[in-house]
Image (spheres, rainbow, N blue to C red):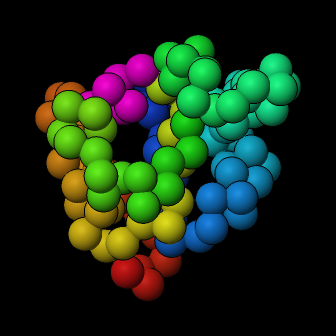
Amino acid sequence: KCRSAGIKVIMVTGDHPITAKAIAKSVGIISEGNETVDDIAQRLGKPVTEINPRDAKAAVIHGGELKDLADDQLDEILMHHNEIVFARTSPQQKLIIVEGCQRMGAIVAVTGDGVN
């Protein structure tokens, strides 16, 4: 329903990437049939490094990867993936993601369990 209203839902969690991806799929944040770079690599039997990230409609980004990204690299992810999950993120990284969305001109709302 959110997508049909023009709302892009991005999941940001402290959960492990495997758990986060499973939850995202179960609630429709990652649509059935949409693949991440890891999914494409596994399907083709190739290393992840040989897959063009733009070929993936969905992305699961680990907080460890996020901390090494420059603003323009984060912007690239936010612009070119329709379905995004950030996993193992810190509270500081959650703010960086919100700021990235705002750089893209998005109006951002945040909800959650309030743990961090």
Q: Residue at x 64, y 32 (%)?
A: 48
Q: Residue at x 49, y 56 (%)?
A: 62
Q: Residue furthest bottom?
A: 115
- Say which quadrant the C terminus sits in: bottom left
Q: Position of residue 42 (x, y in %)?
A: 80, 32
Q: Is residue 52 left or right of residue 32?
A: left
Please state the extent of the stretch shown in magenta in the rendering.
Answer: 75-80
**Spot occupied by residue 21 in the image (x, y as percentages of width and height):** 68, 51
**Can residue 107 be seen by looking at this rendering?**
no
Q: How many marks?
A: 0
Dividing the picture into quadrants, the one containing residue 96 is: bottom left
Question: Magenta span has 49?
Answer: no
User: Residue at 41% of width from left, 52% of height from top?
Assistant: 65
Residue 80 found in image quarter: top left
Please indicate, yes or no, whether residue 98 appears anywhere in the rendered image.
yes
Up/down of 110 relative to 37, above or below? below
- Give the main secondary structure of the magenta stretch: helix
Q: Give the position of the N terminus as an image quadrant.
A: top right
Q: Position of residue 87 (x, y in %)?
A: 52, 60
Left/right placement of residue 3 relative to residue 32 reads left
The image shows residue 20, relative to residue 34, as above or below, that is: below
Residue 56: give x, y in percent of width and height: 60, 22
Q: Is residue 48 left or right of residue 59?
A: right
Q: Is 22 rendered above or below residue 101? A: below
- Rendered residue at 18%/48% (across/down): 99
35 is higher (above) or lower (below) than 96: above
